[in-house]
Amino acid sequence: MRPLKKYGICCMLVILLITFANRISAQTSVNLTFNDNSTQEFMVDPSGKLYFENNHLYIDEGTGLPYSFAVGNIRKITLPHDVSVDNIVTEEFEIFPNPVQNTLHIHSGNGGQHPYQLYTLDGRLLLKGVCQEDETLNLQHLPSGLYLLKIGSSTIKISKL
């Protein structure tokens, strides 16, 4: 085997191992850029969450003790783009499809009425309402990008194509 070919195979194996190791960790990187251009990175476990409440962004890395940031101090929130699933099922809701082109479906398995809010990643409120048992949200007017849907006690990242 020629040295160049051997080198290429080794590089591919290293890349595959790094990719596999990153998927095993199952943590999501959340990067905040503040108005003064300083940044802060958080590694959020699957048990953690990211949510907006009372003009604050809360980031719980999975410890149960969330960090709190005033939305007005945040210039940008960066999440990984490689997260994509067909259906998201929380303890209360099934949300599909994700990524979405025009219409997002929300099914509440426990019935009742649940308030929801759709935010941009910089914390700007775009939509709000009350979800019935089966709800559809028309997102056709929104540009492609990432959004956060707060519904019940869950905040879900929605990707709009």
Image: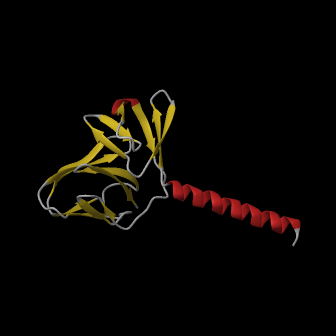
Query: Residue at (76%, 63%) from the top-left corner?
Result: 10
Residue lying farthest bottom?
Answer: 1
Q: Which residue occupies the extreme left position in the image?
A: 112
- Left or right, 82 with reference to 85: right
Locate the C terminus by quadrant.
bottom left
The percent coordinates of residue 67 (x first, y second) are 38, 34
- The quarter of the displayed image where residue 100 is located: bottom left
Instruction: Give residue 19's position: percent from left, percent from top.
Output: 60, 59
Is 156 located above or below residue 88 in the figure? above
83 or 44, which is in the foreground? Answer: 44
Q: Residue at x 16, y 62 (%)?
A: 110
Q: Position of residue 41 (x, y in %)?
A: 50, 39
**15, above or below 124, in the image:** below
Image quadrant in which the N terminus is located: bottom right
Q: Residue at x 49, y 52 (%)?
A: 80
Left or right of 24, for residue 89: left
Residue at the far right in the pictured view: 2
Q: Position of residue 138 (x, y in %)?
A: 25, 61
